[in-house]
């Protein structure tokens, strides 16, 4: 019996050690989020949805800001403004920092919700995801994330093949085919998907209030800048249907909180998009430089 228990214990230890070793190999190609839960706490951050995750490059912004900045943006499903995202930001934030820089990107979807009552926090889906359940966003390896939120077979971590990569500074680089047929197809698909979402999504006063709370929290740690990133004009038309007075709301919020606001909408012809929503990396570099230059002049 003792021998059996010893052998069982050694076998279990071998399995645990092997799994832990695999977790240590996880990197920016393992999935679109994991790496952002393992890097150190930050004193300067880019915040928002996947528009910001793909559209703002810390390495381009750094010379303008004269400091490192981390991209802590996720997706419209994971990081709309609300209690979960604010909690995650606070966990990622270097609490003693007082001279940080925070670029908060906004769009109508990030302050809207689906469901019967867009102000019912209990129905906010992101609260049930890792955004609302992880106790740490700066653990390496982040065992809790890997055990509870990694959505694929662990062996794929070792294969290290992906059509995207989260860089060490948090920027999400994607590698889609950019021939005209592929791009047109993705844009058409997103147009149909976003039109379909209009019947379910409505403005959420609670999410808007959490955007304000997020700004106020960050202001105690440095300077906050609001930015609306560009999209294809057909996508912009859908966003206008979702929330026609969005710009007015953000203008008033920016004035009340005394934070600068840069609206880059209506500049879509200057840039290339992978799918009408997300900036292609070359245009993302241009937009990042434009944002950085604007901040440097504030």
Image (tube, helix red, strand yellow):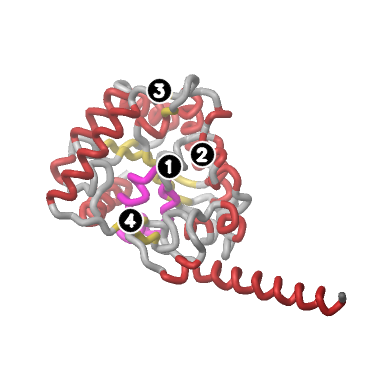
Above-or-below relation of 256 to 106: above
Q: How crowded is the residue under tag 1: few (<14 C-alpha within 10 Å), some, or many (20+)?
A: many
Q: Which of marks 2 and 4 is nearer the N terminus?
A: 4
Disc number for residue 224: 1
Whether the residues at callouts 2 and 1 have beta carbons within 8 Å, the answer is no
Q: Nearer the viewer, mark 4 or mark 3?
A: 3
Q: In this view, does 150 lie to the left or right of 165?
A: right
| Residue 25: % across, % down | 50, 71
Q: Residue at the location (37% across, 50% down)?
A: 53
| Residue 219: % across, % down | 50, 41
| Residue 67: % across, % down | 41, 59
Q: How far apart are marks 2 and 4 (CA)?
A: 25 Å
Disc number for residue 202: 3
Above-or-below relation of 65 to 51: below
293 within the magenta span:
no
Q: Residue at the location (41% across, 53% down)?
A: 71
Q: How far apart are marks 1 and 4 (CA)?
A: 17 Å
Residue range (magenta): 46-73
Q: Distance between the residues labelled 2 and 1?
A: 24 Å
56 within the magenta span:
yes
The one nearer the camera, 250 or 72, is 72
Q: Is mark 4 on a helix, strand or loop?
A: loop
Q: Which of marks 3 and 1 is nearer the N terminus?
A: 3
Quadrant of residue 261 within the rendered picture: top left
Q: How far apart are marks 3 and 1 (CA)?
A: 26 Å
Q: Earlier in the sequence, mark 4 or mark 3?
A: 4
Q: Nearer the viewer, mark 1 or mark 4?
A: 4
Q: Distance between the residues labelled 4 and 3?
A: 30 Å
Q: Which of marks 3 and 1 is in front?
A: 3
């Amino acid at each position: 019996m003792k021998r059996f228990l010893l052998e069982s214990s050694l076998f279990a230890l071998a399995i645990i050690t092997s799994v832990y070793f695999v977790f240590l190999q996880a990197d920016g190609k393992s999935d679109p989020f994991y790496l952002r839960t393992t890097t150190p706490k930050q004193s300067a951050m880019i915040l928002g949805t996947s528009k910001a995750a793909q559209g703002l490059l810390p390495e381009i912004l750094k010379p303008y800001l004269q400091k490192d900045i981390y991209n802590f943006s996720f997706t419209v499903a994971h990081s709309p403004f609300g209690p979960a995202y604010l909690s995650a930001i606070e966990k990622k934030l270097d609490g003693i920092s007082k001279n940080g820089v925070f670029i908060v990107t906004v769009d109508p979807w990030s302050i809207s919700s689906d469901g019967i009552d867009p102000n019912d926090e209990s129905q906010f889906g992101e609260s049930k995801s890792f955004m609302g359940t992880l106790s740490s966003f700066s653990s390496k390896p982040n065992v809790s994330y890997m055990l509870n939120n990694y959505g694929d077979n662990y062996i794929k971590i070792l294969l290290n093949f992906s059509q995207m990569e989260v860089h060490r500074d948090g920027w999400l680089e994607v590698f889609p085919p950019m021939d005209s047929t592929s791009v047109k197809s993705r844009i058409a698909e997103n147009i149909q998907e976003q039109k379909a979402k209009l019947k379910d999504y409505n403005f959420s006063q609670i999410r808007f209030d959490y955007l304000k709370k997020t700004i106020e929290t960050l202001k105690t740690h440095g300077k906050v800048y609001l930015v609306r990133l560009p999209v294809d004009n057909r996508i912009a038309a859908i966003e206008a249907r979702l929330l026609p007075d969005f710009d007015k709301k953000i203008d008033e919020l920016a004035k009340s909180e005394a934070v600068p606001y840069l609206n880059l909408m209506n500049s879509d012809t200057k840039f290339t998009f992978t799918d009408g929503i997300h900036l292609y990396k070359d245009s993302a570099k241009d937009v990042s430089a434009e944002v950085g230059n604007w901040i440097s002049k504030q």
